[in-house]
Amino acid sequence: MSWLIFAIVFWLAAWALNTWLARHHGSERWARFLIPALFGITLLLLWEGLVRGLNISPVILPAPSQIAASLMASTAVLREDFVQTILKGALSGYVIGCGAAVVVAILIDRSPFLQRGLLPIGNFVAALPIVGIAPILVMWFGFDWQSKAAVVVVMVFFPVLVNMVAGLAATNALQRDLMATYSASYWQGLFKMRLPAAMPFLFNGLKIATTLALIGAIVAEFFGSPTKGMGFRISTAVGQLDLSLVWSEITVAALAGSGFYGLVALIEKLVTFWHPSQRART
Amino acid sequence: MKMVAPVLTVLAAILLLWYAATVWMNSQWTYDQAARAGEEVTFSELVTDTLTQKRPVLPAPHQVAVGLWEGVAGQKITSKRSLVFHGWITLSATLAGFALGTGLGILLAVGITHSRAMDLSVMPWAIASQTIPILAIAPMVIVVLASLGVTGLLPKAIIAAYLSFFPVLVGMVKGLRAPDHMQLDLLKTYNASQGATFWKLRLPSSMPYLFASLKVGVAASLVGTIVAELPAGATRGLGARLLSGSYYGQTVQIWSALFAAAALAAILVVVVGIIEQITLKRMGMVQ
């Protein structure tokens, strides 16, 4: 019971502190890190307090401390799953899919007819539940990581394609005319003006695709995988009611997902430093 | 109307490619069968055989169409083989989850626009939560809730809600902050309360943003429901059709379930679009 009371008291105190911080130091840099951090810590403590205070069975919801212990105890398994699912499945599929989307976008950029035909279909396909093709691709490419990469390729292709085509159209007539008065060739215009101008759009698509890549790789493993991989581990560990291992996998997936997204956002910052949305922040 | 010809051309090209791929991918089986029987196959035999196999590697478009038609119209809608039956199971969970997620997203967005502390503490975590492949949690949520005695619609709806709340939250925050300073100042000169500002200015001006994100959210919640049906050995719903099709190698069943899911997603997006048109027209925002 004391755990529960402590957690609730801590929650109220952190809430009051956060409100005070937001009111008086909300625009300062350190507060912008401290406030969300405090909120996260509060959530974890509340979770721990609820599990301990209400004696919730670890079969239903393990406490954060148990998850941390299991995380430490099964690093070898977790590393193997990480390599299988994230590095082999998600990352290779992401690179192939995004690369193919950019190339196809540049190809169809030369043909307005193809653009008018492909874009509505691309937009439509991007809204469909593409994860559903996972069983088919697992059947075609086998159980190993190649089939997961294939699922990821299909999932990331259309969002990136749609964004890239929109980005290639983002220059205005004035800018294109300027290139024409320089008598720039198509390729010079593409590389010197339109590709840089397309970068903010491209990175928008790339950021959406990071989450899709992880989801695709993990979900595809539900349809069959070798005896390693995060999706495989999650579904078998749930069957054995080893929920702290499941939560460790989820922690790894969350860290990998955030890290992946952060990396792409960082590259975006470096590449599109000139864009208003990037300059406004500093 | 100038869209129609290009779209039809691209669709025809896709169909043509599909038929070619069907012949190519299924030919191995035909050749194996012929070799076992000690026969030679001519090209026309090859084509007819690959397009009519019972368990093809890639079913031909007309096979999928027949499978879809049988699933939708060829069965009683209460039958376990009916796609309408499975589609309804999936749709009901999707709609429940979508309603939950939209409600949660709007509530959080209202809180975020009105409280600076919430803005600073909740928003970063809402964004971070989306970098987590949340579908990884789906099997666990289902099993845990099943052990608590909660089964059926609710667990799936929770996952669908999780996937749809984020687009709604982001769009709604943007929309509630859409009125510019001039409009807000005007209301201040009227001495309008915060509630009046919300109901008369912020909420109406957020509607276009809300509907844009509802379209994303409804598609996302369908994906969530389908994935939630995969891992826990569910026997009903489009996701379960996909899974059982992949266990028993019933490719036509997988493809028909896939197309049914795609059609469902398309219909949902179109319905939200129609509601958007009507609402915005009545509010005088579009002609």
Image (tube, rainbow, N blue to C red):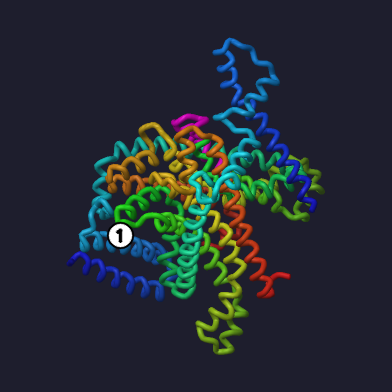
Residue at 64%, 26% in the rendered image: B23
For mark 1, give the secondary structure: helix
* A121 left or right of B122 in image: right
Rate crowding at label 1 as few (under 14), some (14 to 19) or many (20 or more) other CA atoms within 10 Å.
Answer: some
Q: Where does residue A116 sit, x and y in percent of width and height?
A: 74, 48
- Judge by depth and name the residue closer to the eye, A98 or B196: B196
- What residue is shown at x 50% (from left), y 82% (from top)? B195
Q: Specify the farthest residue to the front.
A: B76
The image position of residue B234, as x and y in percent, is: 41, 46
In this view, the residue in front, A140 or B251, is: B251
User: Is residue A146 covered in magenta?
Assistant: yes
Q: Nearer the viewer, residue B268 or A137?
A: B268
Residue identifier under label 1: A44
Quadrant containing the C terminus of chain B in the rendered view? bottom right
Q: Is residue B71 above or below residue B34?
A: below
Q: Using the rendered image of the protein, determine whether residue B12 is visible from the camera's viewpoint.
A: yes
Give the quarter of the image for residue A55.
bottom left
The amino acid at mark 1 is Leu
Question: Which chain's residue wears label 1?
Answer: A
Is residue A79 rendered magenta in the image? no
**Number of marks in picture:** 1
Considering only vertical position in the picture, is B153 above or below A191? Answer: below
A125 on left or right of B79 = right
- Name the one closer to the observer, A111 or B210: B210
Q: Classify residue B275 as left or right of residue A116.
A: left
**Residue, x 69% and y 71% (percent of image)?**
B281
Residue range corresponding to the magenta coloring: A137-156
